[in-house]
Image (cartoon, rainbow, N blue to C red):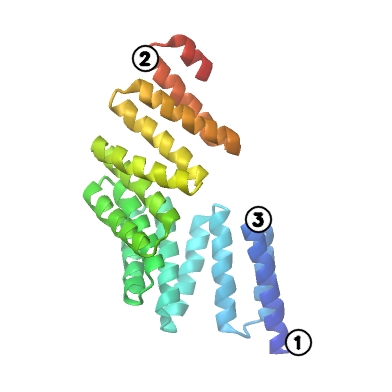
Amino acid sequence: ALSIQDKQKIALSNNELAMICISDGNTKDAITYLNTGITALDNSDEMIFHQLLQNRGTAYVYSGELDIGLAHFYQVLSYYTKCNDSIKAANILNNIGVINYHKGEYDKALKNMLRSVEVYEKKGMDAYAADNFGNIAMIYNETGNYPKAVEYTKKALGIHIQRQDIHAQTGQMINLANIYKNTDSLDKSILYLQHALETAKENKYTNFEAMVYSNLGLVYEKQGLYNKAFDAIKNSLSIYKQTGDAINEAKNLRFLGSISKEQKIYNSALQYL
């Protein structure tokens, strides 16, 4: 018979293999490794068991089985709550909140994320709190509560500025610009996008640069400034072509076609549609 130490080693080695599979997008093999690890563990270590259970829940979520993943996370949450491990419980609550969001359960998502962020703030875990603020803002934006969306995006941005996290600052500036676009505060939207564009160029954040140009195109179109919109989208399209992002390239091509139609430049429209 295997010793407890041997069982734990087998479980943890399978867990490591599973995490590599998850990072590679191979959730099927990840679940197989985790099942093997859980079987090998044979109830010999509750903490390792719940670690594997959490990762199996993640694998199910990534494979699109949200309800199965959710059931795993609730079981793990119960264990961390029983152990008074508030930080791990907060992490799970955040995961549950993200699943709630993707299922369109916005009230549940907000409730779980707000519970999570309360712990992060108490523990001084600013980076985690900022990420949560960003997620909370996204939900408020989705549900049309734009003042709250602005409030929480600015909270996230403030922490990123304090932590001198330029990459995260750029992302939140783009998010803030999108919220202002939704409220028709177009001048504010352009202001944040221009600032984000400068930062993206300075730091060679190519993906953010392309996103900013796409969003500028949308704002300029709303303002009826079709030439500016056209130029911005062409800039974005050029970057997506260079980076091989076929999905966003196709989106931009369709948008260029629609702008051309609005301007009644039919030859251009045919070129881009």
Give the distance between the C-alpha atoms of the residues marked 1 and 2, in whole angstroms: 75 Å
The disc placed on residue 24 is 3
Residue 196 visible somewhere in the drawing: yes
Task: Write down the quadrant of residue 187 in the picture.
Answer: top left
Lower position in the chain sequence, tag 1 or tag 3: 1
Give the distance between the C-alpha atoms of the residues marked 3 and 2, in whole angstroms: 44 Å
Name the spot of residue 197 as percent of width and height, x first. 41, 42
Residue 35 visible somewhere in the drawing: no
- State whether residue 168 is above or below residue 36: above
Lower position in the chain sequence, tag 1 or tag 2: 1
Dot 2 amino acid type: Gln
* Closer to the camera in the image, 83 or 74: 83
* Closer to the camera in the image, 30 or 70: 30
* Closer to the camera in the image, 23 or 54: 23
The residue to which callout 1 is attached is 2
Lower position in the chain sequence, tag 3 or tag 2: 3
**Residue at the far right in the pictured view:** 1
Name the spot of residue 123 as percent of width and height, x first. 36, 77
Front tag of 1 and 3: 3
Dot 2 lies on which element?
loop
Density class for disc 1 (Cα within 10 Å; few <14, some 14-19, many ≥20) is few
Residue at position x 52%, y 61% from top?
68
Give the distance between the C-alpha atoms of the residues marked 1 and 3, in whole angstroms: 31 Å
- State whether residue 250 is above or below residue 67: above
Name the spot of residue 240 as percent of width and height, x first. 54, 35
**Residue at the far front in the pictured view:** 202
Dot 1 amino acid type: Leu
Dot 3 lies on which element?
loop
Dot 3 amino acid type: Asp
Name the spot of residue 18 as percent of width and height, x first. 66, 65
The residue to which callout 2 is attached is 263
